[in-house]
Structure formats: structure tokens, C-alpha cells
Image: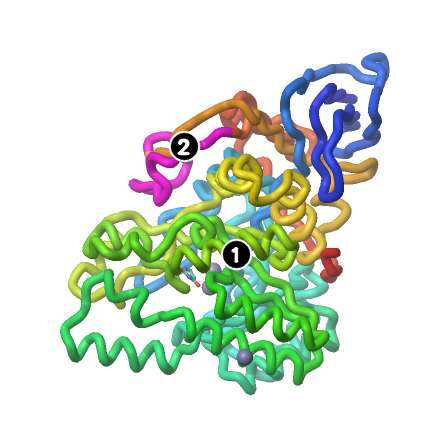
Amino acid sequence: MKLLLQNGTVVSGQESGKKDILLDGEIICRVDTEISPEEADEVVDLEGKLVFPGFIDAHTHFDLEVSGTVTADDFESGTLAAIAGGTTTIVDFATQNKGETLREALANWHKKADGRSSCDYGFHMAISDWNEETSAQIKDMIEAGVTTFKLYMTYPAMKLNDGEIYEVLKRLHDMGGIAGVHCENADIIDALIREARSQGRLDADTHPRVRPAQLEAEAVHRLLVTARTAGTPIIVVHLTCEEAYREIEQARAGGQEVYAETCPQYLLMDDSLYVQGGAEAAKYVISPPLRKKKDQECLWKALKEDRIQTVSTDHCSFTTGQKAMGKEDFTKIPNGMPGVETRGTLLYTYGVREGRISPEQMCRVLSENPAKLYGMYPQKGCIAAGSTADLVILDPEKEAVISADTQHYAMDYAPFEGTKIKGCIDKVYLHGTLVVDEGTVQVKKAGRYVPRQKYTAPQ
Ligand code: DUC
Ligand code: ZN
Ligand code: ZN
Ligand code: ZN
């Protein structure tokens, strides 16, 4: 079956222009200024619409155990929300529990995702237990298409020390893998928590005070020294603040290969949301925490200057009931918030419409760069002959208001409740199948596992 998508404005990482796209089953077979309808079995008119390569969210946590509970969204609800929001591929974190092998962890995550996912999915492997067997199994992971890894410098259940991080990076260097790292200084955070506890400051409004920006910046600096010593490129995930960004720029000035990711919440929300305390503040208890207005400005500027390569979500959702586990003690609040459904429309409305980034930059940070960095390019992340027909059609004039009532998450609140959007997801094609039409999900659970290649550098 040949399908012609006519008259849309096709956005790539380099340019935007009116083009026709011819799909042959699951694959894009031609992209041209004018393709005759006679070549197709069916024609769809996309006049006035923007066409992006399917968005890729390389940072989600579905069906993850945190703080004695499990995220509200599993792969079923999480990927349903993703596809509704124009994300055709997510890369989630298969997480090795201490005492477990990487193979066991990967099998465990396949069980959670296979047959239940409405968008395509891959896995990074989060290494929590570094030993000889883990090291030996890195090769198996890469062969299974798990070519990217995640390391935590905080969280007792998953944290590696600096020496271990060095050893992992050395091994990845030899195997052609790459790691993304959560950077915060765990020891000082623990000390600040003890101090807060001794002073009886246990409300949610204390959360940002025990995880200040300088503890992220210090950890970023230490990670960069570790990566430089190991001679490996590195990815700093969920970058939140100016201080940490300066560390990255300084390392780059010294010739180091460093990639950075940020998230919509760090671009659009700030720490004033914690001031009210209690259940309201608990909704925004994420790590690293929300920062200051000046940090948002720094991140937008870095995006505009192409110094941040990807915008992902760190989707990790807990209901208000789960958040209430910490109402007497903020350290018991499960950390995280949802985001996978609203990333594209938020970035379009508050990035492209407000002139902070161009449509091409939006394409780069949501599609092209993650496809390259996470080993899926050019099958994904671009609209070109031979690529998989994963496409997002955005209606730039349609308006909406974000609300918990209309989202697809297994959630009872929306962090961006009441936020106005101009630019809505109209249609989504997932390997050639129309899975979202007029903003409504039509086909569920069509997602497939994506074995990934080794990373390539985004330009
Ligand atoms: N931060 C969160 O807020 N949630 C999940 C993991 C993380 O690093
Ligand atoms: Zn993290
Ligand atoms: Zn420094
Ligand atoms: Zn995360």
C-alpha cells in the first residue's frame, strides 16, 4: 500500500519546506517537492500542518520501583500517553538490582514492555552492581541492541562510586558504548538531609534545599574529570542549572566530548512551586529539583546555541496518593513527575512560537539528535527515503489546555494543569500505520522493541 502525504511543511534538523512524502508500507520511499497522486493508493492532504520525524524520548521510567512503590505509569499507560503526544519511540531504563545480572535485568524489562507498548521502545541499561560478571555482560547487552548505559551518582540502591564509574566508562570505551549519568553529590545531600531532620524541617518545601545547584555542578565536574581520565565521551542527563552547564562548557573548551540533555520542567518551571509546601509541593518533588528563573534562561539560551543536544522528559509518575507517602517526611516522597505526553506541544508552544528555538532545532532536540546519540539514525530521526515511516503531524493553529482530565497517564494530576498550548498533535504514523488521528489514539500496542546500533555524534 502506497500512501501519499501531500502539501505538509516538512521539518528536518536543517530546513523546513513544503514537500510531499510517499510511504510504501512501513518505509518512506520518496520525499519530493511534488509527487503525483497517481503513484499512490491513497492521498492525505496536510496543508497547513507541520510534519516532524517521530519524536524520541530517551529518558522515561515506566514500571519502576522507587521508594517502596511502583511508578503509576507502566509501559501500557506510559507508551499510550507517549504516542498521543507524538513520541513514536521511548528509551526506558532497564535497571539492574543489586545482586542481579544485566541479562536478568534486560529479561525483566522485556517482560514489562513486550506486547503492551503503543510506541516503539528500546532500553538503556542502568548499572547498579559493578563486578566482573557485569563487565563481561556489557558485550551481550550491545549485541542485544542495548548500546547505551545509565549510571547514578546518587540514590543508595543504584549509586556507583567514582572508581566504579571510571571502570564502567573504560569498559564502554573498549566496547563502543556510551553512558548517561545522573549527577548529584550524594554524600552532601545526605548530610543536608540529616541537618534538616535534626531541625525538624521535614515538609516538601525542604526538598530543593537539600539538593542545591552546586551539588549538581560539583557532580557534573567530577563526572567530567572521570570521563576525561577514561578517555570516553559522556552524556549528562537532566541538566537543570547554569552552574552545571558552565562545567560542561569548560570541559568542552578543553576538547572533551560532552552531550547534555534537559527536560521541559527545567525549562518551564521554577522552585517557587515548592514554597506552598505540603501536597502541592510534593507534586514537583523531582531530582534534581526545579531551579531558578535564571537557570531556565541559561538552558533556553544553551538550546538556541545548540549546546544542549536533547530534550527528554524523565517521565517518572506517582499519583497524589503515592506522593502522600512522604507527607510527614519529604525524604519518603517518591521522586518524579509525568511528562511524556506534553513534551512536543510544550516545546512547540513555549520554544518555537516564542522564538526561543527554531522548528529545525525542535526537530534536532526531539528527533534527530536522540536518534543519532542513541543509535537509531537514519532509520529513525529523519524524513528521508529508506527511513521508517514514523511521523508526527502537528497542527500549529490548534489550541488546547493541559488537564489531568484529558491526558492518557494513569495519573490523577497534571504538573502543567491549566497551561495553554498552541500547536497540537493531529496525526501520528508509527511504521506507516496511522495510530493517532485528529488527536485521538486509534491503534494501541503496535510498538516494537528497537535494537539499537552504536551511538554517533550529533552535529
Ligand atoms: N529523578 C526523578 O525525579 N525521578 C526518577 C529518577 C530521577 O533521577
Ligand atoms: Zn536521574
Ligand atoms: Zn569545575
Ligand atoms: Zn531519570
Type of amino acid under label 1:
Leu
Pointer 2: residues within 10 angstroms few (<14), some, or many (20+)?
some
Residue under the point 77% across and 47% down: 378
Distance Cα–Cα, label 1 vs label 2: 21 Å
Q: Position of residue 339 (x, y in %)?
A: 44, 46
For disc 1, the marked residue is 299
Instruction: State left or right for residue 341 relative to residue 290.
Output: right
Q: Which residues are magenta?
A: 405-422
Res. 420 mark:
2
Q: In the picture, residue 328 is in which quadrant?
A: bottom left
Residue under the point 62% across and 83% down: 167
Closest to the observer, 4 or 264: 264
Note whether 221 is above or below 454 in the view shown: below
Reading the chain from its start, which is encountered first: label 1 or label 2? 1
Residue 118 visible, this angle: no
Q: Are marks 1 and 2 in contact (CB under 8 Å)?
A: no
Residue under the point 52% across and 56% down: 299
Note whether 443 is above or below 38 in the view shown: below
Q: Quadrant of the N terminus?
A: top right
Type of amino acid under label 2:
Lys
Note whether 280 is above or below 428 in the view shown: below
Q: Position of residue 4 (x, y in %)?
A: 76, 20
